[in-house]
Image (tube, rainbow, N blue to C red):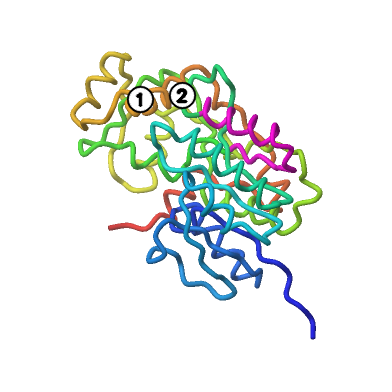
Amino acid sequence: MTSLPPPLTVTGSSGQLGRRIARRLAAAGVPQRLVVRDPARAPELPGSTVAVASYDDGAAVRAALAGSPVVLMVSAAEHPDRLGQHRTFVDAAAAAGVEHLVYVSFQGAAPDATFTLARDHWATEEHIRARGLRATFLRDSLYADFLPQLVGADGVIRGPAGEGRVAAVAQDDIADAAVAVLRDPAPHAGATYDLTGPAALTLAEAAATITAVTGREVRYQPETLEEARASRASYGAPDWQVDAWVSTYTAIAAGELATVSAAVPELTGHPARTLAEVVREAPRG
C-alpha cells in the first residue's frame, strides 16, 4: 500500500488570501491541513483536515503543525500585539519540527518602514531567521483588490499619498505564487520575493482605472496628515490602528511601494493581473 504524503499546512484559510490558496491546493489534489480559529469558517475542501489553533496559543499551534513539513503562515489579523502572536507561532513551528515555513510578509518590510505594520513583518522575518527555520518570504504589495474599497460613498479616494505610486498586486496572483512555492519549496529556501502588479500607479490613476471599468465616477483627493487622521477618527479605532491606516498612504507617498517586480510571472508562469483586470473580475452587488 502506498502511503499518502504528509499534508501541507495552510493558516488563514477562512480569510480572503488563505482561502484562495487552500482552494488551489485542493484542486491540484494536494493533501492539506487547515489551521483556523473557528472550525465553522473553514472551507470544506477535498483532501483537507481541520485543526483549531490561534496564533497566541503556542501549545495548540504546536499540535496543529505536528507532522506537517511545509507550512504557510499568513500574517495574523491586525492586533496591538500581532508581533507577539507571530513570535509565538514561529516558536511553536520550530518546536513542532516544521521543515519549511512560507511566510506572507509585506513589500518594503524593514525596521524603519513608513507603513507601521511593515515593521512588524520585518521583525517576524528576523525571528524566523533567528529560530533557524528554512523559510521563504512572500512580500506582497498593497492588494489591488483593496483599492476599490478605498472609494468613499461620494466616489472619492482620500489619503496623504501625494503623487506616489503603488504596484498593487492581485490576491489571486499572490495565491498562485504561494501555491507554486508550497508545491515545490526546496528551490525557494532562503528566498524573498516581492509580489507586485505589472505597473505602479498613482491613486489618481487608480481612480481613473476604476472609473473606466465600472462607469462610476471616482477621483482621488489628497489629504494632509492632520486631515487623514481627523477623517478616520469617526471609526473609533485605537491610535495604533489609525496610524497603520494612514501610513499605508504615506508609504505610497514615500515611494516605498512603487517597485515593480517580475516575481509573479517568474513564479506562476503568467503575467501579473492589472488593476483593471482585478476590478473587472470583482463580484458586483
User: Residue sitting at 69 percent across and 51 percent down?
Assistant: 98
Do callouts 2 and 1 mark residues in contact (Cβ within 8 Å)?
yes
Relative height, residue 121 to residue 211 (above, below): above
Residues packed near mark 2 inside 10 Å, few (<14), some (14 to 19) or many (20 plus)? many
- Mark 2 element type: helix
User: Residue sitting at 66 percent across and 36 percent down?
Assistant: 128
Kind of residue indicated by mark 2: Thr
Kind of residue indicated by mark 1: Trp
User: Residue sitting at 46 percent across and 67 percent down?
Assistant: 43
**Residue 193 relative to residue 118: left or right:** right
Disc sitting over residue 116 in the figure: 2
Q: Quadrant of the C terminus?
A: bottom left
Q: Which residues are magenta?
A: 118-139
Disc sitting over residue 240 in the figure: 1
**Residue 10 relative to residue 183: left or right:** left
Reading the chain from its start, which is encountered first: label 2 or label 1? 2
User: Residue sitting at 36 percent across and 19 percent down?
Assistant: 160
Residue 213: x and y in percent read 39, 47
Residue 102: x and y in percent read 65, 47
Residue 9: x and y in percent read 61, 59
Residues packed near mark 1 inside 10 Å, few (<14), some (14 to 19) or many (20 plus)? few
Disc sitting over residue 230 in the figure: none
Relative height, residue 10 to residue 78 (above, below): below
Would residue 122 be counted in the magenta stretch?
yes
Q: Quadrant of the N terminus?
A: bottom right
